[in-house]
Image: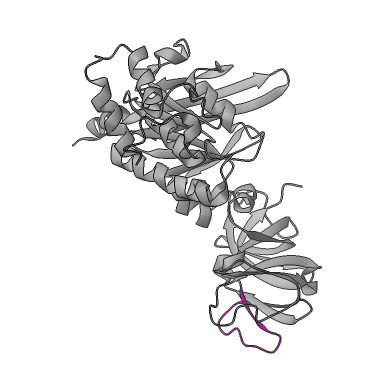
């Protein structure tokens, strides 16, 4: 296959294309010059804190809001002038908007009736989607007779029953308790994989984004900070915001002493540290402000006199608190050597849980390769 044919195939494979899209409300740039492509059959999560622009971006894709600038394409066609009801999109909202006077089956059948599907085919199709969401035998139940998780499944089936080109999820799991939310995350992933429906999910829950997604778009202050596979966003964050937002990350402020081969040496309160540079080299020279970032699970902990052989970084600290979470202990440790930095460390040692307590002196260590270094703009 030649290059032009390959590019054509790639273009045909894109279901959603967001091109330089902005949304301005007065002086507020809710979304600022956002661009990304979403291939057919992929599950994309737009992740970010409240006010980051993620829901505004989803509403523009759905057709509820029109971009101030830029264009959105669905299956290669511009859709700014296409009203929401004429876009082949299924949606599940945080407020499920199920009809309480209808049964589960009637709720699922509603989109088919609105689209004037052959009435003879509707019952079989509804039953198929009830089975898909594992609600076989529940079709005759009223919405108030179903649990929260079962109502979620009805909403998913209703959004999918007319076989849309695109499924949009607007924080549909936010109101559920943690255990049910985690169960439904896996259910969303299973259903999406089984049907192969192209999906965009919006959430502020980093675990959800990592669990369900093929790709993640991380937003902050209306701008896309990074688009990557979950493992890429977690292990190779594009900047300090992404490193801080996904996972539990410790930041150590310092001043650059040397930059060579994208390795940065810096000092934090007189302690020499090193790690790979993340981002552009421009402006990063000796004396510049920087911060090193190391994740809680990449730090090893031992007693004050213990050994941490083979680790380039080695500092002493005092345990401030320890939180038992079942499968792990989270230690909060004050490191005076690093200018009273409070660091969090995960301990997964199954045999010696809670081996340290508040007030204990400990030693921490990590590999230089695990400390990513970011340039400070101030």
Left/right placement of residue 320 relative to residue 371 reads right
Left/right placement of residue 204 relative to residue 160 reads right
Left/right placement of residue 327 relative to residue 345 reads left
**Majority secondary structure of magenta residues:** loop
Asked if residue 310 is among those painted magenta in the image, a careful observer would answer: yes
- Where the N terminus falls, by quadrant? top left
Write the residue at 27% across / 33% down: 128
In percent of width and height, residue 19 lies at 48, 25
Examine the rendering and report whether any part of residue 28 can be seen.
Answer: yes
Asked if residue 166 is among those painted magenta in the image, a careful observer would answer: no
Q: Which residues are magenta?
A: 300-312
In percent of width and height, residue 215 lies at 44, 43
In the image, residue 305 sits, relative to residue 130, either above or below, namely below
Examine the rendering and report whether any part of residue 76 can be seen.
Answer: no
Q: Answer with the quarter of the image where residue 176 lies.
A: top right
Along the line of sight, which residue is nearer the eye, 276 or 53?
Answer: 53
Q: Residue furthest left?
A: 1
Along the line of sight, which residue is nearer the eye, 248 or 352?
Answer: 352
In the image, residue 137 sits, relative to residue 237, either above or below, namely above
Q: Give the total number of marks visible in the rendering.
A: 0
In percent of width and height, residue 321 lies at 74, 70
In the image, residue 151 sits, relative to residue 366, either above or below, namely above
In the image, residue 239 sits, relative to residue 259, either above or below, namely above
Write the residue at 46% across / 32% down: 36
In percent of width and height, residue 300 lies at 60, 76
Indicate how the structure is coloured in the image: one colour
């Amino acid at each position: 296959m030649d290059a032009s044919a390959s590019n054509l195939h790639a273009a045909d494979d894109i279901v959603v294309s967001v091109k330089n899209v902005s949304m301005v409300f007065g002086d507020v740039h809710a979304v600022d010059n956002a661009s990304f492509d979403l291939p057919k059959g992929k599950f994309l999560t737009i992740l970010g804190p409240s006010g980051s622009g993620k829901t505004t971006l989803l509403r523009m894709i759905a057709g509820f809001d029109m971009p101030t600038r830029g264009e959105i394409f669905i299956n290669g066609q511009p859709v700014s002038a296409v009203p929401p009801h004429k876009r082949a999109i299924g949606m599940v909202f945080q407020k499920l908007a199920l009809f309480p006077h209808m049964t589960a089956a009637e709720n699922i059948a509603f989109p088919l009736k609105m689209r004037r599907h052959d009435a003879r085919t509707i019952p079989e199709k509804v039953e198929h989607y009830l089975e898909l969401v594992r609600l076989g035998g529940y079709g005759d139940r009223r919405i108030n007779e179903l649990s929260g998780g079962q109502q979620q499944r009805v909403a998913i089936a209703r959004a999918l029953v007319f076989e849309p080109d695109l499924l949009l999820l607007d924080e549909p799991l936010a109101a559920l308790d943690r255990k049910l939310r985690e169960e439904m995350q896996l259910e969303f992933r299973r259903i999406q994989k089984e049907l192969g429906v192209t999906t965009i999910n919006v959430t502020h829950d980093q675990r959800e984004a990592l669990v369900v997604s093929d790709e993640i778009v991380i937003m902050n202050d209306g701008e896309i900070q990074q688009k990557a596979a979950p493992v890429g966003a977690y292990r190779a964050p594009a900047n300090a915001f992404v490193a801080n937002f996904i996972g539990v990350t410790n930041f150590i402020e310092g001043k650059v002493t040397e930059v060579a081969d994208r390795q940065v040496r810096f000092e934090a309160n007189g302690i020499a540290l090193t790690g790979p540079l993340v981002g552009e080299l421009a402006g990063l020279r000796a004396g510049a402000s920087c911060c090193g970032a190391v994740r809680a699970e990449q730090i090893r902990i031992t007693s004050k006199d213990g050994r941490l052989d083979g680790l380039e970084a080695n500092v002493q600290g005092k345990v401030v608190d320890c939180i038992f979470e079942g499968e792990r202990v989270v230690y909060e440790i004050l490191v005076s050597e690093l200018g009273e930095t409070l660091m969090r460390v995960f301990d997964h040692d199954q045999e010696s849980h809670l081996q340290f307590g508040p007030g204990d002196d400990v030693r921490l260590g990590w590999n230089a390769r695990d400390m990513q270094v970011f340039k400070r703009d101030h």
